[in-house]
Image (spheres, grey):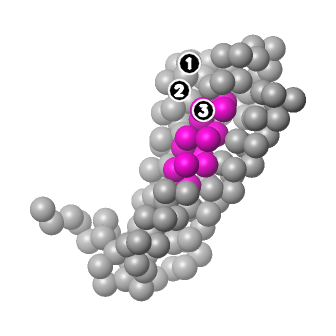
Amino acid sequence: MNLPAWLSLRDTPYEEGEFTTLWTFALATYGVGDMVTTIALMEFVPRLTEGNPLVAAAVGAFGQSGLVGLKLAAFLFCLVVSLLAAQDGDRLLYYGPPAGLAVTGAFTTVYNLRLLFG
């Protein structure tokens, strides 16, 4: 199966193993850690409210599915930006999205755990 050129790292200065590692870390912290701890807070600490107005609106309208959908949309947007940047050799936009998601995910996961158990 031939993928569109922008979905491949072929003919770019980047390696697939590095790409996989970066995005696995982003998925673990932002996609899993932050989402699981946010859902745990919503279920077990109902007196707390979501601080992010966009997330609060999505959860208010669609429940946990709104949270998951919003996180998935953000993750996929960042993934596309990174893949397109790889084609142009743009290091900032290649490394920035997974790094930003990973840092955001790690921070919010720790913060949520503090709220949950603190």
User: What residue is pinned by disc 1?
Assistant: 63
**Disc 1 or disc 3, which is closer to the eye?**
3
Left or right, 75 with respect to 101, comes to left
- The image shows residue 18 at horizontal and vertical percentages of 46, 73
Q: Amino acid at mark 2?
A: Gly
**Which numbered dot is residue 26?**
none
Identify whether 73 is placed above or below 2: above
Q: Amino acid at mark 1?
A: Gly
- If you read the primary sequence from the N terminus, does the residue marked by circle 1 or circle 3 appear first? 3
Q: Are marks 1 and 2 in contact (CB under 8 Å)?
A: yes
User: What residue is pinned by disc 3?
Assistant: 36
Q: Residue 79: say if magenta.
A: no
For the record, the magenta segment spans 26-38
Q: Residues within 10 Å of mark 1 (few under 14, many from 20)?
A: some
- The image shows residue 12 at horizontal and vertical percentages of 37, 83
User: What residue is pinned by disc 2?
Assistant: 66
Q: Can the viewer see residue 57?
A: no
Q: Can the viewer see residue 39?
A: yes
Identify whether 54 is placed above or below 105: above
The quadrant where residue 87 appears:
bottom left
Q: Main secondary structure of the magenta part?
A: helix
Task: Please identify the residue farthest to the right as the structure is shown.
Answer: 118
